[in-house]
Amino acid sequence: MTQSLPYVLQVNGIGKCYAKYSGLLARLLSWAGFPVKASQEYWANKNISFTVAPGQAIAIIGQNGAGKSTLLKMITGTVRPSTGDIQFVGRISAMLELGLGFNPEFTGRQNAYMAGGLLGYSAQELGNLMAGIEEFAEIGDFFDQPLRVYSSGMQARLAFAVATAVRPDVLIVDEILSVGDSYFQHRSFDRIKQFKDQGTSIILVTHGLADVRSLCDHVILLEKGQILKQGSPDEVVDFYNAFIAQKESAQLNILQNRDENGWLKTTSGDKRAEVTKLSLRDQQSGTELAIAQVGQMVELVCEVKVNTPIEQLVLGFMLRDKQGGIIWGSNTWHTDLVLNQLQSGENLVYRLPFKCTLGAGSYSVTTALTRGQSHLDENFEWQDNLLVFDVVNANKPAFIGSTWLDTEFAVSRIGSKTNN
């Protein structure tokens, strides 16, 4: 495979239909190719099309039952599409279920040879790869013990080490980043990022939206087996969060636009309460700030209007960096400042004073007006990146990162004794 190819994977209008027949004879005739009408049909996927370019990372997200696993099975060839076709170039390595097909009576080494053979490696290739597999798995003497004595985390380490022993052209990952301990997850994610940097295309299925933001270039949102939305990570992830909150509503009310500086503004909710103004201010003077200094005492001031009677109101803030990473977030539910029995026309002012311990860069504030602990209960209004501000380091020693520590180095010099 060369990097000049326009794609490594192309999915063209695929769909999967599971049919129910009136009886065994009808099913047998259908399998034989006769035109037998099914008594009932269920489309797990329908009209799915997308292209994966060399070195591109794509995330497929959606709720349980949205059709993600069926889509991956069609891409890997374990399920045949009912419609459409799939074209790919190069070697595909798929991790749909870590440890699938392992024999509990075989040792880890024997299972590595067996699983590697199923991936298409020769015995000689696996012999050359085995030291690296053993090293990455980090299961010590257990590598030569039966799999039945392994913990689930050890099985996950072994399976991941085998599946990524050779860098593939396309790596398909289904929820493996949620398996095992945090150390394993960190090492797995690092290897996936290294593969991407080296030109491997990634298809990631996960509920970890932070992983989507940090790794992926493009996101596909599935709902009821079809593509509901696709685009940049911030656009689709923010839309998905709003969609989940409003899924039970009769009508979705999600608005998205991107400002001149590239920040995506996503607004959702039924507007029973709404933020009329959000500002960052200097605590002492009350001056509104577009730029804050590292170490400055500032406060967020949020003005809220109640449009209809509300039994309970919670305000939440979420602070993000330019890459969409969450720096901090909390709400008045957690701080025991829930307001009850609010009337139409009431106006509220919330204040959040804090010391600006942020590093130099751009940041945004997302607001949420809800009932209960989260916007999944009742979403009155959610506004992603409503306020954007910059932080500069004007008078502190130089540092890197998104957090300033109010500290100083200390050193003691202990002189050595010399013999005269």
Image: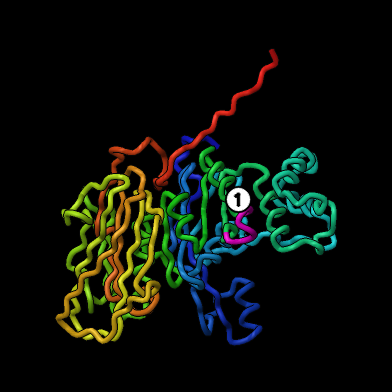
Is residue 183 magenta-colored?
yes
Residues shaded magenta:
178-184
* Res. 200 image quadrant: top right
Residue 351, given in percent of the width and then of the height, sits at: 25, 65
Residue 161 magenta = no
Give the SS element for disc 1. helix
Between 408 and 18, the residue placed more toward the observer is: 408
Q: Residue at x 75, y 52 (%)?
A: 139
Q: Which residue is mark 1?
A: 188
Q: Is residue 119 left or right of residue 302?
A: right
Q: Residue at x 44, y 72 (%)?
A: 224
Task: In this rendered view, identify the residue nearer to me: 145 or 290.
Answer: 290
The percent coordinates of residue 18 (x first, y second) are: 55, 75
Q: Is residue 100 visible?
A: yes
The residue closer to the viewer here, 3 or 325, is 325
Q: How many marks?
A: 1
Q: Position of residue 249 (x, y in %)?
A: 32, 80
